[in-house]
Structure formats: structure tokens, C-alpha cells
Image (cartoon, rainbow, N blue to C red):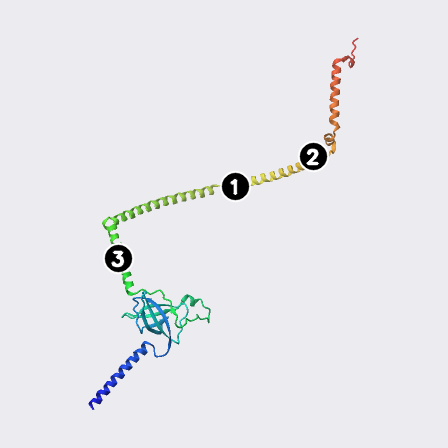
Amino acid sequence: MKRRDEVLVGVFITAALLVGISGSLWLARRGFGSGYTMHAQFPWGAGLKTGQQVLLAGVGIGYVDQVTLKPNGYLDVQLEIEKDYQIPEGTTATVVAVGFFGDQAVALTPDSALLRGLPAGVTIPPMQPGDTIPRGRPAPSIADLLQRVDTITADVSSLTTALNRQFVTRGGFQDVHQTVESTQRLVDQLAGVAAEQSRNVTATLAMIRRSAAAIDSATVDSLMGNLNQTTANLSRLTTELNATTTQLNGILAKVDRGDGTVGRMLTDTTLYSNIVNLVARVDSLTADFKKNPRKYINLEIF
């Protein structure tokens, strides 16, 4: 009886271990359903191991089935993806930390720019089973963040030391104070100049207003009347000059055509010859008169 109890206890413990192991495998591998294999490559030190999750846009779609260490400095990671999920083209794979205990997972990130550019109802073609998912830009790790914090802390310490040396040790604060005082004096001087200019402008405007008020409107009206009368006189004079010009143009036109006495005199080609002949005859007569005056004057005195 006692031996049989021991056997039953052993069987129960063995069954419990098998159930626990099976449950762990089921939870790790999201059940025992069939899927398909994909591949990814990551540098050494990624911290991956079998059974870790594979996330697509934050949703668990599979697990890490195998991790192979390659001598070229990379890990060949085999991923088991559930058959109900498809990985779109352009997806990249990165290793991300999950939880606070150093657990890792493979995160698959689709190309968001490509997804935004798709028309409604159109989907991106999926990658084929067995393809290698390109490696994306890894997120900074805690060590990287701590190293960055240390670098920033060192830079802040150097800056603090330099500021202390420039402003405290070498009297930089006193120089700044003197500069502020000099700037304040300059601002006060500029304000005084601006106020003086404002007073001068105000006085000039007041003088202009007084000068404008001192102008007699009756004198201005009389001056404008005289200007209007002068303008009218000039207009009449221009009209008369235009009429005179028209008459002269008519007379000159008649002269050019040979109309009238003056026209015929100017256009007669024989008039000049006749005048020359007359002058020659007068000269000949005058010479003959001087030579023989008795021929023309016969004077007898009793």
C-alpha cells in the first residue's frame, strides 16, 4: 500500500512537470499551431535567446526559434511566425528591451511612410516565408543612454568650470556690471536726444501753423484772381497770334503762287534784267550829261 502511494505521487509529479513544461512552451510559442519561418540578422551582443517574442507593430505574432552565432560578427536569428499574420514589404527588424529584467524581443516595424501613401483598400504585398527581414535602426539601450548622460554631465562640468573661471576668478561679473551701466548711460543719452528732437519738431510745427494762420485769405483770393485774369489775357493773345500767323501764311502762299503785285514782282524773271538795263542807261545818261551838259541844258542870258 505504501509503495503504491509512492508510485502515484511520482506519477502525479511527473504529470505536473509535463503540464508545466507544455504550458510554458504553449505560452512561449503561443500554442502549438503551425507557422512559417523568417530570418533576421543582428550584431553580437543583442541579448537574444530562444523563446523570446516577435512583435509586429507592438502585437505578438511569433517567437525566436533559433539563434546561431556567426563568425562574421552577426547573429543569424530564425523567427517562427504564426500563419495568421503576414509581414508587409519594407518592414525592418530591431531588438528592443521589454520589462525591467533585461528581457529582449524582436520588433518588426512596417514602413509608415509607405503605409500613409497607399490609397484606400490597397495593401502592401507581404514578404515570402524564408525571407530575411532587413535590420532597422536599433533603439538606444540603457548603456547607451547612461553613456550619453555621462558625456552630458562631463560637458556641463566643463562649462561650469569655464564660467567660474571667466566670471568669478577673472572678474567677469564686474565687467558685465560695468557694461550694463555703460549701456544704461547710453540709453539715457539717446532718450535725452530724442526728447530734444521731439521738442524741436513740436516748435517747428507750431511755427508752421502760425504762419499758415497769418496768411490773409483775401490777399490769396486777389492773387488768384489776378492770376486767372493774366491767364485769360495770355489765352486771348495766343488766339490773336494764331490768327495773325494764319493771315501771314496765306499772304506768303499767295506770294509763292505769284498772285498780286508783290507775287508777280517776286516771280517775274525779266524784272531784274529790266532794272539792270535801266540802271545802265541811267549811268550812261549821267555820264553823257556830265560830258555834254549843254546838250541837255540850253541857257541864254539876255
Q: CA distance from mark 1 to mark 3?
A: 85 Å
The C terminus lies in quadrant: top right
Q: What's the CA distance linking mark 3 and mark 2?
A: 109 Å
Tell which tag, 3 or 2, sits nearer the viewer.
3
Residue type beneath disc 2: Leu
Q: Amino acid at mark 3?
A: Ala
Circle 1 sits on which residue? 220
Q: Is the residue under label 2 in contact with that under label 1 (CB below 8 Å)?
A: no
The residue to which callout 3 is attached is: 154
Secondary-structure class at tag 3: helix
**Residue at (65%, 38%) from the top-left corner?**
242
Spot occupied by residue 81 in the image (x, y as percentages of width and height): 37, 74
- Left or right position of 270 against 79: right
Residue placed under numbered mark 2 in the picture: 252
Question: From the viewer's perspective, is the residue at label 1 or at label 2 nearer?
Answer: 2
Nearer-the-camera pick, 291 or 172:
172
| Quarter of image, res 79 | bottom left
For the residue carrying disc 2, how many other residues have a C-alpha within 10 Å: few (<14), some (14-19), or many (20+)? some
Q: Secondary structure at mark 1?
A: helix
Residue 161 versus residue 122 in the image, above or below: above
Farthest bottom residue?
Answer: 1
Outermost residue, left side: 2
Q: Residue at x 29, y 47 (%)?
A: 179
Instruction: Characterize the local packing of mark 3: few (<14), some (14-19) or many (20 or more) Cα atoms within 10 angstroms.
Output: few
Left or right placement of residue 16 versus residue 291 in this view: left
* Left or right for 181, reference 275: left
Query: Between 90 and 271, which is closer to the camera in this rendering?
Result: 90
